Image (spheres, rainbow, N blue to C red):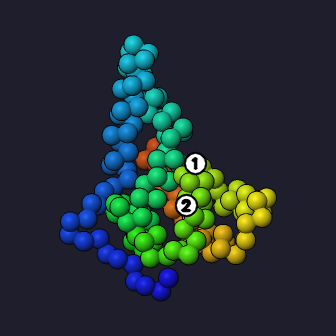
């Protein structure tokens, strides 16, 4: 894990989570408006944020970790992490990633591991390296994450 993180190459796909999510919001708004028979407006986009933002962000984060797409809002140090770490725990890593993609948090995964008699050491190691709590971005409709608010 001491290997330097790869930098995105000139031909690497680099995208913005915020810019790309606008397309997803618009698709959702169009589909829901078609079902309703009229334009549901910005309220529909707020519902997308409430129902889908976290999952959308988690999926982009996993692409970033896999080195498939460099998302500019995410940590450059994490880019391609999964291509250079945890080869000896690939199945456990896949299971943890699938749980994270569906909204599980660290405590959920630790509880799952304990309940299923999975050695907790590798679970902690993977969760610490993934550091899911540092990858929480606010949607443009939300305020900054609480940890980023400075005292006045």
* Residue 150 in view, yes or no: no
Counting from the top left corner in percent of width and height, residue 12 is at 25, 65
**Dot 1 crowding, Cα within 10 Å, few <14, some 14–19, many 20+:** few
Counting from the top left corner in percent of width and height, residue 116 is at 76, 59
Residue 97 appears left or right of 10: right
Quadrant placement of the C terminus:
bottom right
Say which residue appears at 70% left-offset and 75% top-offset: 121
Say which residue appears at 44% left-offset and 33% top-offset: 45
Counting residues from the start of the chain, the first of labels 1 and 2 encountered is: 2
The residue beneath circle 1 is 102
Counting from the top left corner in percent of width and height, residue 65 is at 44, 65
The residue beneath circle 2 is 94
Most extreme residue toward the top is 37
Mark 1 and mark 2: Cα distance apart in space:
12 Å
Q: Nearer the viewer, residue 13 or 98?
A: 98
Question: Is 78 rendered above or below residue 24?
Answer: below
**Dot 2 crowding, Cα within 10 Å, few <14, some 14–19, many 20+:** few
Of circles 1 and 2, the one toward us is 2
* Residue 122 in view, yes or no: yes
Residue 89's disc number? none
Give SS at disc 2.
Answer: helix
Residue 122 appears left or right of 6: right
Say which residue appears at 33% left-offset and 55% top-offset: 16
Counting every numbered tag in the picture gives 2
Give SS at disc 1.
Answer: loop
Question: Is 139 rendered above or below residue 44?
Answer: below
Say which residue appears at 78% left-offset and 64% top-offset: 117
Q: Quadrant of residue 69?
A: bottom left
């Amino acid at each position: 894990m001491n290997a330097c993180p790869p930098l995105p190459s000139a031909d690497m796909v680099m995208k913005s989570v915020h810019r790309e999510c606008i397309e997803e919001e618009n698709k959702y708004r169009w589909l829901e408006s078609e079902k309703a028979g009229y334009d549901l407006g910005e309220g529909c986009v707020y519902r997308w944020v409430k129902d889908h933002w976290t999952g959308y962000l988690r999926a982009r984060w996993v692409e970033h970790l896999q080195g498939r797409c460099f998302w500019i809002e995410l940590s450059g140090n994490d880019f391609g992490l999964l291509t250079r770490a945890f080869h000896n725990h690939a199945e456990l890593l896949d299971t943890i990633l699938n749980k994270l993609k569906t909204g599980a948090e660290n405590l959920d995964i630790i509880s799952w591991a304990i309940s299923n008699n999975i050695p907790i050491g590798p679970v902690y190691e993977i969760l610490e390296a993934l550091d899911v709590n540092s990858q929480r971005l606010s949607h443009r409709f939300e305020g900054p994450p609480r940890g980023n608010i400075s005292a006045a």
